[in-house]
Image (cartoon, rainbow, N blue to C red):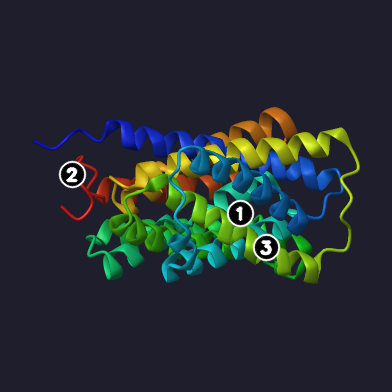
Amino acid sequence: MKAPLGRFELYLALAGVLWGTSFVTIKIALNNDIDPIYFALLRFVIGSMAIVAVVIWLRRWDSSMLFYPPIILNGFLNALSFALQNVGMASTSATNSVLLVNTNVGIVAILAAIFLAEAITPRIVAGIFLGMLGVLFISTNGDLSAIYSGTFWGNLLVLAAGWAWAFYIVIQKMVLNKKTDVLMVTAAIMVITTLFLVPMTLLFTTSYVIPSATGWIAVLYIGLVCTFAASLLYNTGLTRVKASVSSVILLMEVVSGMFFAVLILGEMPTAVTAMGGALVLISILVISFSSNGNGKRAGA
């Protein structure tokens, strides 16, 4: 008899909530004049140090994981996505960012159907259409001339990050289907991500200054909570939940991100952005109802 997967879905939901808080944290850091790519690097330096210390303490370090090609590829995708997201967020809101990143639910469904043989249905196709329409409203705020504005390009970079993470999710599911030590997989991904962020930072960062205590608090919080803790929760949950279903559960990130953006940053969405967000959330519901979330093991 198979064990129920409720706790694994809970791990994913908790990861989504924690990652939702990261958008507000990033915006606070950017508002405190911290370079966006440098902030991404600091996030992973701290997260990697924490998880490597735990892995070594538990005597589970496995250097071969650092040379496993899918983990290297995912480390690159992760580094690229965080760099794109942080740079994009310099010219768009935390609210827009959390909505745009999570449009990848449809892309995950398509990729999971191709590479993991997970079913794709007409509802998924409808959900993708609604999600893309919502993205258009969020990105332009109903004004197509916004395509030429900085906000539009910020939105586009954040959207690109979300879609790159769609590939990451599917590859990560394939990795976890083969590698059983979730802790070491998480550590390897974080270390490789850090290594890829180093040259990106050296190439594009113009300032390495953390000008305030608030900035350092943001660095420590995002490194320990949103990177170390959330990544471990996510990978643990993904071991027993389908990639397409996991991407739906992770949309707790949308709820968390928008809640804290209003609470902490006072970001009240416009009517058009709210309508776009509603379409994104409807697309999420449509896709979730089409997914097989009945508690079976992924691939079962």
Residue at figure coordinates x 33%, y 56% from the top left:
179
Q: Where is residue 165 in the image (x, y as percent from the top left)?
A: 50, 60
Above or below: residue 114 compared with residue 244? below
The kind of secondary structure element at disc 2 is loop
Tag count: 3
Disc assigned to residue 138: 1
Query: Mark 3 — residue?
Result: 197
Give the CA distance from mark 3 to mark 2. Answer: 37 Å
Give the CA distance from mark 1 to mark 3. Answer: 29 Å
- Looking at the rendered image, the quarter that the N terminus falls into is top left
Q: Which of marks 3 and 2 is nearer the N terminus?
A: 3
On the picture, is 35 further left or further right than 279?
right
Residue at figure coordinates x 54%, y 59% from the top left:
162
Q: Earlier in the sequence, mark 2 or mark 1?
A: 1
Q: Marks 2 and 3: in contact by CB < 8 Å?
A: no
Give the CA distance from mark 2 to mark 1. Answer: 35 Å
Residue nearest the observer in this picture, 205 or 288:
205
Q: Earlier in the sequence, mark 1 or mark 3?
A: 1
Q: Position of residue 54 (x, y in %)?
A: 52, 38
Amino acid type at mark 3: Leu
Above or below: residue 31 compared with residue 86? above
On the picture, is 198 further left or further right than 274?
right
User: Is residue 270 visible from the viewing direction of this image?
Assistant: no
The kind of secondary structure element at disc 3 is helix
Disc assigned to residue 296: 2
Tag 3: Cα neighbours inside 10 Å, few (<14), some, or many (≥20)? Answer: many
Amino acid type at mark 2: Lys
